[in-house]
Structures are given as C-alpha cells and as structure tokens.
Image (spheres, rainbow, N blue to C red):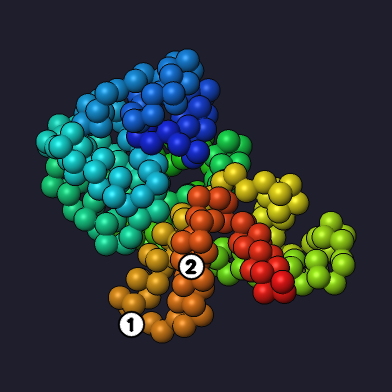
C-alpha cells in the first residue's frame, strides 16, 4: 500500500503528509490553500485539483478537516469524494472530529459508492503530528482497520481499533476532549489563585508536576502557552467548543444528564464570543485574569 491521498493540509494534515513522504509513500494531496500546496509540492507530493480525482487513484485516502461543514462538502459536494461510484474500493479514513451522526452518514454513503470508510479521530496536537506520536481512535470494520494499520504506524505511536461501530472512536475522542475542557478550566483558575497569592508559577508547576495535581494538559497549557504569554493556536478555543458541543449533543441523544459539562460548554461559548475563540484554548487563563482585574477595578 504505497499510494496515499490526503485532503486537508492544515496544522495536523501537513506534518502527517510530510512524514508519509519521508517514509517513501507516494502522496497525492488536495487543499484550497495554495501556499501549503506549494510546500507539499516541494516535498514531492502530487497536487490534485479536486477531491473526486483522488478516488480510484490511491489505496487509502485520508481527510483531516477543521469543521463538520467542510467534511460534508469534501465528501458530498459537487466535486466531492462520493460524486461517483468507485471501481477499486478505496479505503477512506476521516481523522477529523465530527458528530457520530455524520460518521454514520459517511459510512453508509461510502458503502453505497463501493468504498470502505473508517472514522479515526486523533489526539496529540500539532506536536504529535510532527513527531509521529499521535493517538488514533479508529471506529469501523476491524478487517479494514488491519489493512491500513501499517500506514497509521507511520503517523502515530498509539493506534487503537475501538470497535466495529463506526462512531466508537469518535465517542472516545469526545470523552477525551470533554476532559481536556475540564482540565483547561481547572488549570486557568488554579494558576490565577497562585498569582494572587504571589506564588511563582514555575515553582508551582515543579511541585504539582510530582503531585496528584499533575496533568498533561497542565504541562501543555502552562509550559507551551501561558508561561510564554503566547496564545497562537495549537488547538483553538473555538475547536474545543465544537467538540464540546458534539459531546453534549451525544449525551442528550443518550438521555444523559451532564449539568457540569453543559455549564462548561456555556463558559467556553461565552469566552469565544468575547473574542478569545481563535486563540489557543489555554487562553482561558488570560480571560480568567482579565475578568478578575475588571472586577477589582
């Protein structure tokens, strides 16, 4: 399996394509961003001018896209992947985080157009994509999963087949991101207490990093963003809002009462509307600090 298609060359997609090319795969790519296409061409990727041209021309086709609307357009649009029946049973793998409902819709349409489909959301961020340390949470046919497992091993180090249900990997990803939302809020408010009490945040991290207050999100948010006072997005607050919405919607569909999760979602929605949404999710710390400063004026 040497011919790979890849649609979506953003923060996650580009480093994954770069790694596949470095490992000798033939990679054919599509994106609307001309600059990133030029970067891929310089790395010897083959540029394709519409998604539909990738079907039947590759063994496995990845999509890595930022929103459910864009995913739907790439698969169902006028020049989308489902524009006509495939002759070669292409394996389509969506690494985007979308709703379980869309997972099911994509699977059914893939089968109707003579293709295979796996929903394989990832965790690990841009650093994970660059360093091949991503976690893949794959839902769908185990037989199909094993056909692409070797390719996934070139992109990540934690590869899980969650279950035959197409939305099983997505459910795990939504749980993961729900916890990320909790941890990010906790870190933001905890560090604000430390600030007000004059505790050095570097020393605090050193102590909590060897205590039960330690978490990977604390490490990520503090050392990469808060400490540097730089909130250029690795994972934007708006993307977190999107995923929390999916998690709460899933809970509603399952008739589960999750009051804390709903309050958390409302918090992030409000922060987004206040102008923080395009920044990294760790910017919640800045917002907590700003709100406190306004209150104390």
- Residue 197 visible from this viewpoint: yes
Q: Residue visible at 46% across and 61% down?
A: 273
Q: 110 above or below 56?
A: below
Residue 112 in the image: x percent, y percent? Answer: 13, 47
Q: Position of residue 211 (x, y in %)?
A: 80, 69
Q: Nearer the viewer, residue 297 or 171?
A: 297
Q: Secondary structure at mark 1?
A: loop
SS class, disc 2: helix
Say above or below: 66 vs 84. Answer: below
Q: Is residue 213 left or right of residue 16?
A: right
Question: Which residue is label 1 attached to?
Answer: 255
Q: Is residue 126 above or below residue 279?
A: above
- In the image, which disc is placed on residue 270? 2
> Mark 2: few, some, or many residues within 10 Å (few <14, many ≥20)?
few
Distance between the alpha carbons at the discs numbered 1 and 2: 25 Å
Q: Name the residue rendered at 43%, 42% in the picture.
A: 149
Front in this rendered view, residue 140 or 77: 77
Is 6 on the left or on the right of 181, as rendered?
Answer: left
Point 21% across, 55% down: residue:
105
Counting from the top left corner in percent of width and height, residue 63 is at 35, 40
Nearest the viewer among 200 and 51 is: 200
- In the rendering, at what x and y percent does residue 109 appear? 17, 49
């Amino acid at each position: 399996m040497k011919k790979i298609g890849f649609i979506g060359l953003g923060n996650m997609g580009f480093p994954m394509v770069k790694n596949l090319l470095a490992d000798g795969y033939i990679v054919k790519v599509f994106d609307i961003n001309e600059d990133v296409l030029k970067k891929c061409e310089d790395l010897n990727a083959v540029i394709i001018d519409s998604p539909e041209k990738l079907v039947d021309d590759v063994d496995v086709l990845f999509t890595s896209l930022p929103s459910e609307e864009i995913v739907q357009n790439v698969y169902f649009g006028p020049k989308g992947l489902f524009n006509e029946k495939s002759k070669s049973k292409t394996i389509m793998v969506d690494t985007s985080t979308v709703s379980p409902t869309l997972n099911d819709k994509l699977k059914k349409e893939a089968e109707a157009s003579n293709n295979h489909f796996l929903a394989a959301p990832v965790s690990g961020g841009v650093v994970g994509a660059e360093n091949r340390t991503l976690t893949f949470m794959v839902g769908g046919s185990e037989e199909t999963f094993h056909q692409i497992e070797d390719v996934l091993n070139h992109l990540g180090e934690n590869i899980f087949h969650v279950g035959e249900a197409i939305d099983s990997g997505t459910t795990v990803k939504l749980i993961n991101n729900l916890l990320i939302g909790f941890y990010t809020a906790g870190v933001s408010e905890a560090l604000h207490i430390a600030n007000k009490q004059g505790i050095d945040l570097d020393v605090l991290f050193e102590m909590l990093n060897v205590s039960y207050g330690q978490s990977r999100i604390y490490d990520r948010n503090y050392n990469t963003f808060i400490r540097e006072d730089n909130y250029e997005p690795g994972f934007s607050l708006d993307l977190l809002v999107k995923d929390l919405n999916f998690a709460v919607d899933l809970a509603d569909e399952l008739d589960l009462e999750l009051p804390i999760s709903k309050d958390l979602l409302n918090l992030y929605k409000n922060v987004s509307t206040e102008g923080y949404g395009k920044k990294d999710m760790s910017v919640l710390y800045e917002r907590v600090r700003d709100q406190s400063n306004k209150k104390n004026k």
